[in-house]
Image (spheres, rainbow, N blue to C red):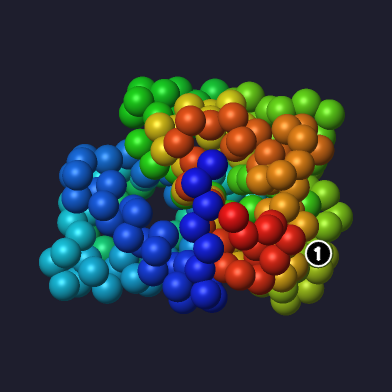
Amino acid sequence: MRIVRTKDYNDMSRKAANVISAQVILKPDSVLGLATGSTPIGTYKQLAEWNHKGDCDFSEVHTYNLDEYVGLSHDDPQSYHYFMRTNFFDHINIDINNTHVPDGANLNADEVCPAYDKMVADAGYPDLQLLGIGRNGHIGFNEPDDVFSKGTHCVNLTESTIKANSRLFEREEDVPRQAYSMGVQTIMYARMILICASGEDKAQAVHDMILGPVTPRCPASILQLHHHCIVIADEAALSLVPAE
Ligand code: PGA
């Protein structure tokens, strides 16, 4: 793992945007795996700014998001479809037909999951997969478990994730209890992984990801086995990882 220590959230966002921008400049028809959450918002904003300036062209890029809540329509403001449009896709010159998020409006997991896996496989898997990390070490919605997941699957969210995500909903009861998530195996097929973290509340998860044993109890720890994984995290998130 290559670790890049940044001053703060803005510094993390700018450096992450630089890596993604370089990927798209070197390969204009890149396949990007994208993430939602608070972590990538600054990165998306920076990329949109460079896109406006003409420095980063998304017209040939294809994207596949990690996850989506089950039971929310694409236009629901809490859905990840909506998040991606309002935080990124509406602000760049991407063809919306080239963007993909698991279909949370379809409650039939047997239909949604294999279809999504096939799409990602047919696209040749991401050149670059952007990830955030949960406070419990989850990646996508792959929660701590006895085994690592494989393909896209329906997940029962843990209480800690429901609690963490309730800040974005009016009431905790409104947070969906299930999500479709790309599996850990699919995430590992990406040719490059860029995982970002900011803030002290991520420090334990970031420590366990980098220095802990590789175990499905901390799903992000599997990234130690990836041949090209970059961690970009601020001082607070890296506070439990000694600087070299
Ligand atoms: P966050 O979520 O970016 O909102 O902290 C990250 C995650 O849960 O993967």
Q: Which residue is mark 1?
A: 163
Kindly indicate the quadrant of the structure image that contains residue 121. Answer: top left
Query: Label 1: how many residues lie within 10 Å, few (<14), some (14-19) or many (20+)?
Result: some
Q: Position of residue 135 (x, y in %)?
A: 74, 58
If the image is split into quadrants, where does the N terminus sit? top right
Residue lying at the far left of the rendered structure:
54
Whether residue 189 is visible, yes or no, is yes
Q: Position of residue 50 (x, y in %)?
A: 23, 69
Residue lying at the far front of the rendered structure:
244
Q: Position of residue 27 (x, y in %)?
A: 20, 41
Q: Position of residue 163 (x, y in %)?
A: 81, 64
Kindly indicate the quadrant of the structure image that contains residue 132. Answer: bottom right
Residue type, mark 1 in image:
Lys
> Element type at marker 1?
helix
199 w.r.t. 131: above or below: below
Residue occupying image coordinates x 54% and y 75%? 8
Residue occupying image coordinates x 63% and y 24%? 150
Name the side, left or right, on which 187 lies relative to 17: right
Please name whichever residue, 7 or 169, is drawn nearer the observer in this view of the structure. Answer: 7
Residue occupying image coordinates x 84% and y 29%? 146
Whether residue 79 is visible, yes or no, is no
Name the side, left or right, on which 198 lies relative to 58: right
If the image is split into quadrants, where does the C terminus sit? bottom right
Mark 1: is the Cβ under 8 angstroms from ligand 1?
no
Name the side, left or right, on which 70 lies relative to 112: right
Please name whichever residue, 20 or 141, is drawn nearer the observer in this view of the structure. Answer: 20
Residue occupying image coordinates x 60% and y 37%? 223
Please name whichever residue, 110 or 13, is drawn nearer the observer in this view of the structure. Answer: 13
Q: How many marks are shown on the rendered structure?
A: 1
